[in-house]
Image (spheres, rainbow, N blue to C red):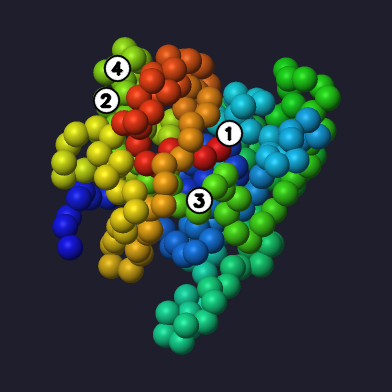
Amino acid sequence: MNVVGTVESLWRYPVKSMRGEELDEIFTGYPGVYGDRVFAFTSSLSPKGFPFFTGRDQRQMIRYRARFRNPEKAARPINLAEAESSGANPISANASELMIEVETPDGKTIAIDDPALIDNLRANIDGKHELKLLRSDKAMTDCRPLSIFAVQSATKLGEETGVKVDKRRFRANVYVDLTNADAFAENQFVDRSLRIGSKVVVSVLERDPRCMMITLDPDTAEKSPAILNKSRKLTKAWPVFMAPC
């Protein structure tokens, strides 16, 4: 087994397209990271194949901070010891124990299921957006259940565009610091498996396509189209894992 790098940081995103939280550890299984994207908003204007309301529709959404009211219940499945010892399926805490409060960019704290949050999200956008809150026990990711990104690739992209590229633009669950410091070395992971820590094994099937989410600054929501334009020009060298919403 070859060591290809080390884990630089671990992240999850309790609400799809809102700001993530850095964690010391994460539990992950076939559905993805526990507590990741358990809530999302859908919009009447979104296509049926992708019904979600995201930073594509409201750029400021990535500045909203979502936090679990009971972080200890959201850390790992409630029957983790049993699941590990007997092969039982991991079980999520009940909905009331996995409730979330959201801090808006202007400092207000609103419960995830409070209609006032929808009113806040709809400010200054097309009024035809009719939003609904969606909850799931499993992560509502765009394609694959786990996203991985190398910090070297973010650095290189910044050098190519002349824009300061914060790694958080890519909304990964696992950021890695590669032993091979070359950017875009993730291409070599396709059709191979990666072991992360002592238990998690990830099979890499393909690279993910890109969208405008990576153009948004995670602190200001300002848009830098050059980042996406450059990524498209580097298609053959673009990282394996990219950011879901």
Which of the two discs, 3 and 1, labels the residue nearer the N terminus?
1
Secondary structure at badge 2 equals helix
Q: Is residue 83 visible?
A: yes
Residue in view at x 31 percent, y 56 percent: 192
Gap in Å between the C-alphas at discs 4 and 3? Answer: 28 Å
Tell me whether the residue at label 3 lies in contact with that at label 1, contact meaning CB atoms closer than 8 angstroms: no
Amino acid under label 2? Lys
Which disc number belongs to residue 144?
Answer: 3
Q: Which residue in the protein does label 1 denote?
A: 64
Q: Amino acid at mark 3?
A: Arg
Which mark is drawn over residue 175?
none
Q: Position of residue 134 (x, y in %)?
A: 72, 49
Tell me the mark number nearer the camera, choosing from 2 and 1.
Answer: 2
Q: Are marks 2 and 1 in contact (CB under 8 Å)?
A: no
At mark 3, the secondary structure is loop
**Which residue sits at x=74%, y=45%?**
133
CB under 8 Å between callouts 4 and 2?
yes
Horizontal placement of 133 versus 208: left or right? right
Tell which circle, 4 or 3, labels the residue nearer the N-terminal end: 3
Residue on which the image places disc 2: 156
Residue linked to disc 4? 160
Q: CA distance from mark 3 to mark 2?
A: 24 Å
Q: Which amino acid type is marked by label 4?
A: Glu
Where is the N terminus found, in terms of image quarters? bottom left
